[in-house]
Amino acid sequence: MSDIVALTAAQAAAAVGKGDLDPGELFEAYRARAAADDLNAFVWVAGEDATRANGAGGAGGASPLGGVPLGVKDLFCTEGVPSQAGSKILEDYRPPYTATVVRKLAEAGAPLLGKTNQDEFAMGSSNENSAFGPVLNPWDRGRVPGGSSGGSAAAVAAGTAPWAIGTDTGGSIRQPAALCGIVGLKPTYGSCSRFGMIAFASSLDQAGPLTRDVTDAALLFGHMVGRDDRDATSIQFPEEVRRPTAQRLDGIRLGVPDDLTGEGVEPGVMARFEATLQIARDLGATVERVPLPHADYGLSAYYVLAPAEASSNLARFDGVRYGLRRDADDLLTMYTKTRHDGFGPEVRRRILIGTYALSSGYYDAYYGRAQRVRTKIADDFRSAFERVDLIVTPTSPGVAFELGAKTADPLAMYLNDYFTVPMPLAGIPAISIPCGLSEDLPVGFQLAGPAFSENRILDAAYALEQAIGFDNSPARA
Amino acid sequence: MSTTSQAPTDVTYEPVIGLEIHVQLRTRTKMFCGCELSFGEPPNTHTCEVCLGLPGALPVANAEAIHYGLMIGLALGCELAPQSIFHRKNYFYPDLPKGYQISQYDEPLCRGGRLADVRIHRVHLEEDAAKLVHAGSSGRIHGSAHSIVDFNRGGTPLAEIVTEPDLRAAEECGEWLRLLRTTLRQLGVSDVNMEEGSLRCDANVSIRPVGRRELGTKTELKNMNSFRFLEKGIRAEIARQEALVRAGEEVVQETLHFDPRTETLTPLRSKEEAHDYRYFPEPDLVPVTITPEMLERARAAVPELPAARAERFERDLGLTSDSAKLLAWRAELGDYFEAALAGNGPHPPEPQPLANWVNELVARIEVEDPAESRVEPGALATLVGLVTERKVTQNAAKQVLDTLVAEGGDPERIVEREGLGAIGGGDTLEPIVQQALDANPDVVEKLREGNMKPIGVIVGFVMRETKGRADGGEITRIVHEQLGL
């Protein structure tokens, strides 16, 4: 089959299932493309031995995911395979165990294709904070793919991976998906195990799929969910994850937050958003405005809470047991030199912010207050979902920006997360789907729902996707 | 310094002491992972990604440790929190692989409570650190050539028990800690061995003039890893503080490290203790919610404890308070006592005399537990019964006990074999008393004059003649009779 890469992951899995496609051939097609990747989307690619292992009679054949190979964000631990979280401090670190989600997907028939580049410890919105260099956007190589799961997004968009997983803490799946013209789902907090995910902010981190279309997202997500005894915060997903089939949105009430369509949204993005709302109406949905009075404070709260947790989560990188060590005559100097040389500037900045926010005397003013904002945001969403079924926003205020455009201005960079941060603060699921182009670059449309409403979100996203008819093939050319 | 005005030599100072006790819980596995606890295995063999703090690993709270924590809370009469949470205590040290210790902070498992006369402030759960070995002479990380880490101990469940500052003397601390140890041992939640580190005790010590309510500046004493060192360390610190204050100087709040080699206290470097721990709720764990089932299970697992047992001995058996504590606070003595009391031999003992005789026995044996001696509880009971029935005198009974300790056996047979039966009744004793009176005319004269003091001479004479088999009271009665007093 010469048009293997034209198939979506679900189509490829079906072809393997019917015996029309050899899983070894499928694996090798992507392995060769990933090995030849020139976007810097991969930091490690499986060798030819993996193709043999995943060939006919290998794991793929009769499995639900058909042996369709998987791009895995670098921060997922994979046994014996570099898992560096985009950081120099973990350069060539090879864990002795595999993350639960990666293991589950491999068991379901999605073998590891490669590890994808990312912002260091998932801190960033452009993938420029990787110790292994920036990732290029396949729609325009002078631009960023978004972040932090930029490698996964770029690989799926460019067709060097049929599908991939990433993690979302404040938008790290949805925003790069939007900027690369693909689908990204951030699930309900707790629905996918975090065991084996190198932590950024534990109370926000969630694994999710980055895929070419909504069907692929549902298929992959369905094999990621589940209670894990090794993650105390994981919960059994309450229902079967279904393959979406909705053609219409009759009776669906969409809410556009009053307080979240602020200034700073590019006109082209706003135009695509409005056009998508009209498509939704045409499919039978109603659109109304809903108040989310505290959502505007989400960004501030997020940039206190996430760094606070990160400052603690990253304390284990101390040079004592693994990763980089800078030897010194005394312990304190060993710690400071190791951590100074091992962490990039953005990571150091957030460790300092977080350390400050947790310090005695400042805890209540920063961490304590941010937690209260978080509670209020969750309450806002609860109230809103009494009036509407789903809340919709642009995923990102702008399209992919040029490499280096925002690296000197962290605050401008943080504003990328404006629309994506409130959902993880509330623990609720949200998806980004491509809704068209602005300035020849993809625009993302975000749909969020109450906790565990993924089936409803996927259905609505699917109906919109069919009606929008976005063509993402140019990125694979 | 006698010229200094602030040298109040006439003031008496009172020590005020609170204890912080860390107890390693004897669960099967560690606090937050599935590794089995280690007891002297080769270094770093009981480890996994969680207790090594590898990237991506997550903690899961050990249900058995929570169960043990509840048992401790119930045993100490604490208020059990329906919901408690874990916090992260952040600091860098090579024995702390995550860069933070998972502990409990402002929402602990148990609050309040009391054991004997000492109030409990709180009980919470946390994880133990790994073990560091420093190469070089200092024994500390500063100045060592290199240090090695054994993570076998890292992650062992700990219960931290904090008292209110209710203790007033070093000896009292030792005595109370022994009671706590017995209590925890009876609960079966820990090996509670100070030398092996499964029971560790820090002390907060301050002094104040007797009668004053406000507390003085306290110091924290660490590393006193035996009961002897605990009392020594606290005594030394009280003396040091008192000398300082009497010299008109002030006590500085600091942490002091007890050196068991020199038996002295030295301040830890301020760098080692100047911490802002940046506590915040552990986001990787969910709150610990205590269900009625968990509570019921913990209640059912708590046996009768020393304090309650002492109360029962006092209330139901009429033991003196001292006897009751002595038996109950050392569980093995209480068990032995109760076994002796329960036997239904032909000569049942009274509780209080039996308690006294358990003491006599303990003084004569080298093992801690009398059950491990040659003296069967039933044998001691019989002996005490014989004494009560005046078939054997106190003195003769002590000789029988010596024989029992040496050889074991049946006290009645020993009495018979060695002719130690009490010489009762006038028929046998009267002639001997008469002999004694005849031999001591001066004593007889004094007795007749109403001076009863020298009657001891007569009793002594008779005792010698009867090898202690005579009853003192009976002798006195016969003397009165014969002299017509």
Image (cartoon, coloured by chain):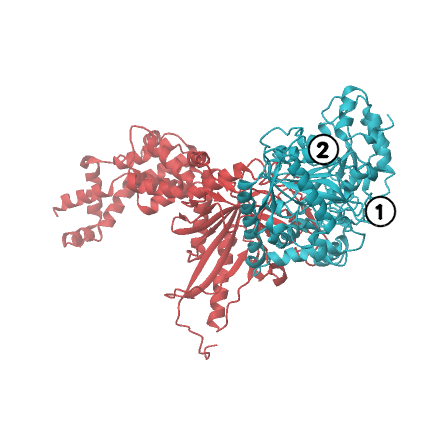
Chain colours: A cyan, B red
Question: Element under label 1?
Answer: loop
Among numbered discs 2 and 1, the one appearing first in the sequence: 1
Viewer-proximal residue among B419 and A362: A362
**Which quadrant of the view contains residue B262?**
bottom right
Disc tally is 2
Residue at x 22% of width, y 43% of height: B473
Viewer-proximal residue among B478 and B202: B202
Q: Is residue B436 left or right of residue B344?
A: left
Q: Residues within 10 Å of mark 2 (few under 14, many from 20)?
A: some
Task: Indicate the position of residue B439 as horizontal and vertical percent values.
Answer: 22, 47
Q: Residue at the left extreme? A: B484
| Residue annotated with mark 1 | A141
Image quarter of the C terminus of chain A: top right
Question: Element under label 2?
Answer: helix
| Residue annotated with mark 2 | A466
Q: Is residue A440 visible?
A: yes
Q: Is residue B276 left or right of residue A105?
A: left
Q: Is residue A281 left or right of residue B470?
A: right
Residue at x 46% of width, y 71% of height: B246
Task: Indicate the position of residue B212 as horizontal and vertical percent values.
Answer: 38, 66
